[in-house]
Amino acid sequence: MTNSVKAPLEGIRVLDLGRYQAGPRCALMFARMGAEVIKVETIRGDESRANGPTVRGQSAYWVQYNSGKKSLSINLRTEEGKEVIRDLVKVSDVLLQNFRPGTIDIMGLGYDVLKELNPRIIMINVSAYGQYGPLRDRVGFDPIGQAMGGMASLTGFPDDPPILTAFPLIDRITALHATIGALAALREREISGEGQAIDVCLADTGFTTNEIPISAYLGDGIVAERRGNGEGLGGMYQTTDGWLIIAANNDHMWGRLCEALDKPEWLEDPRFTTRADRGKNTADLERELTDWFSTRTTKEAVDYLSGFSIPCAPVNDVVQAANEPHLREREIMMEVPDPVAGTMWVSGKMIKFSRTPMVVGSAPTPGQHNEEILKDILGYSDDKVAELQDAEVIRSQEPALASD
């Protein structure tokens, strides 16, 4: 990044008190867009540093959600530690936390305190069920959102149990809700001059992922049913060397598919006239489609159908996905230096700006930036920093390097 071109959020400072995914991934988005993100962790280091999988002694989990951040390793059970955070609030733009509702208030760092210290501060509160509501005091993780909102009940095949996604979708979407809300609050602050508190939660996100079926039921009593990989040309098909998915449900796509498969008679068949008709007669279509795909490789089928502008893609396993040219060319994953593993692959430029860069950095060691934060940002003296270290209010740890 050149000095003449600044990242979109350069000059914004975020205090990240988040843990696990939904909170830290919001702060990660801020870091990628150029904000200075200070990861506030315990003097022993954040607990997710121990989460697997491990790459050459380094937690891939930790690195994914904390790369590009600075680490302040501090004991927030002490008054001195809380005073450091209060001082940082005065010179920061955003504070993010995802403790159980009420905990941050008990710590003496609730929004009523923060806005007295800095009326322009924006506080992001992430939780399982929200800062208010009938389930406020319950704990929860990503699967809770998938289950409560009804998404899990519609995932899988009709005769199977409800299925969870293979990755924490609710955490990821909640993180984006938090990011979008904070960006909007920063924009509104330019007008009002005041910050505000933001409340996002896993349960809310779970309901939004199932918003269309819920709307249909509330509006007209329509009950959605689990239907596996879809119906009416929205499914998976086995090829000679793998699997492929097509999404050709609308009438325009249906016409293209009939042309590609040299089946003009299907266009006149009353069983397939509309999308609803095709949905009712899926089994008849599936037999012929299954036969067609069974004689071709995945690449052959994808290349051929794509020539007719039919939405389709290979169903990649992890190895195949990791080796997709798209992933490398668009820098979706990028290799960065790592103090433990040597290098690590992290999520990279998920947003492309035409003029300003995304910022992709390394994950810090515990307390790596203690002195920089306390001296350069807060102006603490060498003696004061030494006192905090001696009292074990702060602590820096050298990385445990992986063996060759």
Image (cartoon, helix red, strand yellow):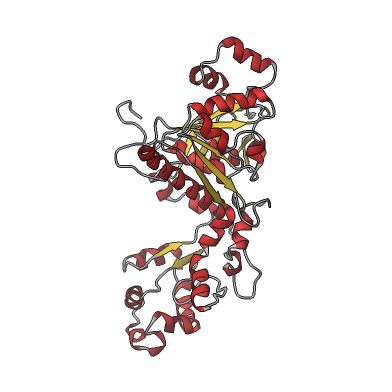
Furthest-top residue in this view? 383
Q: Is residue 325 above or below residue 164?
A: above
The percent position of residue 3, horizontal first and vertical second, equals 33, 25
Q: Residue at x 31, y 66 (%)?
A: 307
Q: Residue at x 50, y 65 (%)?
A: 211
Q: Residue at x 50, y 53 (%)?
A: 320
- Left or right of 104, for residue 363: left
Q: Nearer the viewer, residue 193 or 282?
A: 193
The percent position of residue 28, horizontal first and vertical second, equals 50, 39
Please state, as top left, top right, bottom left or bottom right, where the N terminus lies in the image: top left
Furthest-bottom residue in this view? 270
Q: Is residue 296 visible?
A: yes
Please state, as top left, top right, bottom left or bottom right, where the C terminus lies in the image: top right
Q: Is residue 266 above or below residue 188?
A: below
- Left or right of 185, for residue 88: right
The percent position of residue 222, horizontal first and vertical second, equals 52, 78
Which quarter of the picture shows residue 226? Answer: bottom right
The percent position of residue 309, horizontal first and vertical second, equals 32, 66
Which quarter of the picture shows residue 159? Answer: bottom right
Label tally: 0
Q: Nearer the viewer, residue 266 or 117?
A: 117
Q: Is residue 397 visible?
A: no
Q: Residue at x 50, y 58 (%)?
A: 316
Q: Nearer the viewer, residue 82 or 50?
A: 82
Which quarter of the picture shows residue 329? Answer: top left
Q: Is residue 278 above or below residue 118?
A: below
